[in-house]
Amino acid sequence: MSNLSKIIVCSLCFSCVANAAHAHRSTVEQIGDYLQLLVPAYAFGMAMNEPDWDGVKQFAYSYGTTTAAVYALKYTVHERRPNKANNHSFPSGHTASAMSGATFIHKRYGLDRAIVPYLMTGFTAFARVDANKHWWWDTAAGAAIAGLITWNMVDRYENVAISATPNSVRVNVKF
């Protein structure tokens, strides 16, 4: 068997094993897994669609800082997961990821545009507890960390900007 054939067979076998290992996961858990990525992707897409380049940078910085803080705590606190899989339960990275996106939308573009992302974040937290991957306080801490970091790193998006110099007044309106 050639090396290329071995690689293809191994990757197919790995795919089968991975699918079999995840076959026991509930639909609720799988939806939570997708939402942890969908909410921040939606936030990023919203900033790109404006086009709000300052928002894109602020999202990247706040999301990166949130991720770093969560993983620093996971590997410092060593809280055992409810399912005993490992000792990286505190705080919930899934919930923090979703909350970072929802809080970005809220702070940057307003609460009315963030209600659905907040509901998705709540579902993500529920799914992590329901799947026995986190304690409820892990998800609350992940949401709090992401919310605080993001709220403090993001500015409100202003559609109208007014600037003045001694000789002029300038009004910029973004559509």
Image (cartoon, rainbow, N blue to C red):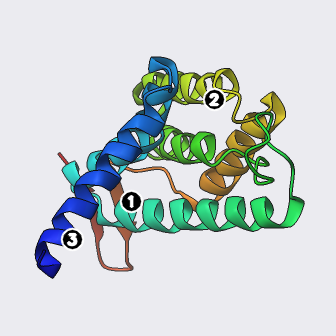
Q: Secondary structure at mark 3?
A: helix
Q: Position of residue 27 (x, y in %)?
A: 44, 19
Q: Which residue does the numbered mark 2 point to in the structure image?
A: 125
Side of 8 relative to 151 (left or right): left
In the rendered image, which quarter contains the C terminus? top left
At a point 76% along the width and 34% down the height, the residue shown is: 83
Q: Position of residue 19 (x, y in %)?
A: 36, 39
Camera-side residue: 131 or 175? 131
Which residue is disc 3 drawn over?
A: 7
Q: Secondary structure at mark 1?
A: helix
Q: How many marks?
A: 3
Q: Quadrant of residue 30?
A: top left
Q: Spot the residue most to the front.
A: 1
**Observer-nearest of 76 and 174:** 76
N-terminal label among 2 and 1: 1
Q: Nearer the viewer, residue 75 or 107?
A: 75
Query: Could you say where residue 96 lies in the image, as x and y percent from the top left?
Result: 62, 46
Query: Which amino acid lies under the numbered mark 1 shown in the image of this protein?
Result: Gly
Q: Which mark is residue 95?
A: none
**10 versus 137 height, above or below:** below
Kind of residue sitting beneath label 2: Ala
Residue 117 appearing in the image = no
Give whichever of discs 3 and 2 has the lower sequence position: 3
**Taking the image as drawn, is residue 76 in sight?**
yes
Residue under the image location 29 percent in, 52 percent down: 13
The residue indicated by pointer 1 is 55
Label 2 sits on a secondary structure element that is: helix
